[in-house]
């Protein structure tokens, strides 16, 4: 599936945050991207199914965070943490209940950014996840 920039909500006007910050909204989540709105070229392989040049780190943060968390190598994860910060990554994982991530990835992020252990345990025990990961029984 290919995503076009027109599928995402426009960024509302905000007061000037400085030359290195862009503020936007993505699915109701306020975003402050601390770097350029364009993604680094090193992330292009993660977005093979999209018009990479039109992806916007602020406007499409929900999509970008999910894709990088699920499939990104270490350098992409470092970029993600620098760009959005651990609080936004934590909020994304909590809002999605760890979906799009493997059990191992959820446990990794639980340890790294302090996801609530009881929530993680509940997410990983959900029948849908267990069925998807082949451990229903």
Image: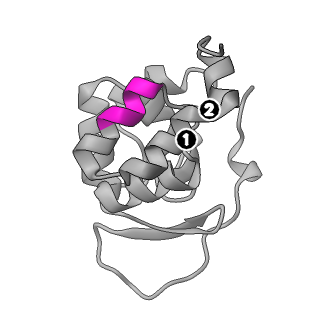
Quarter of the image where one finds residue 128 = top right
Which one is earlier in the sequence, the residue at label 1 or at label 2? 2
- In the picture as drawn, the residue positioned furthest to the bottom comes out as 15
What residue is drawn where x is 34% and y is 80%?
17
What residue is drawn where x is 37% and y is 48%?
117
Residue 50 circle label: none
- Magenta segment, prevailing SS (helix, strand or loop): helix
Was residue 66 drawn as part of the magenta stretch in this picture?
Answer: no
Marks 1 and 2: CB-CB under 8 Å? no
Residue 51 circle label: 2
What residue is drawn where x is 31% and y is 23%?
73
* Depicted 37 relative to depicted 54: above or below: below
Quarter of the image where one finds residue 33 = bottom left
* Depicted 47 relative to depicted 29: above or below: above
What residue is drawn where x is 46% and y is 41%?
121
- Residue 80 is situated, as x and y percent measured from the top left of the image, at 33, 44
- Residue 32 is situated, as x and y percent measured from the top left of the image, at 40, 67
Q: Is mark 2 on a helix, strand or loop?
A: loop
Residues in magenta, as a range: 103-108
Q: In this view, does 21 lie to the left or right of 61?
A: left
Q: Which of 120 and 56 is in front in this view?
A: 120
* Residue 120 appears in view: yes
Residue 123 circle label: 1
Mark 1 neighbour density, 10 Å: few (under 14) some (14–19) many (20 or more): many
Distance Cα–Cα, label 1 vs label 2:
32 Å
* Residue 35 appears in view: no
């Amino acid at each position: 599936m290919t995503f076009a920039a027109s599928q995402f909500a426009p960024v509302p006007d905000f007061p000037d945050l400085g030359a290195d910050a862009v503020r936007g909204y993505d699915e109701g989540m306020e975003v402050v991207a601390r770097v350029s709105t364009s993604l680094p070229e090193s992330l292009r392989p993660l977005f093979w199914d999209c018009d990479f040049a039109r992806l916007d780190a602020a406007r499409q943060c929900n999509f970008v965070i999910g894709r990088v968390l699920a499939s990104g190598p270490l350098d992409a994860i470092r970029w993600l943490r620098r760009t959005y910060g651990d609080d936004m990554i934590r909020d994304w994982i909590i809002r999605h209940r760890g979906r799009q991530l493997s059990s191992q990835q959820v446990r990794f992020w639980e340890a790294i950014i302090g996801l609530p252990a009881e929530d993680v345990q509940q997410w990983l025990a959900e029948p849908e996840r267990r069925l998807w990961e082949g451990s229903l029984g």
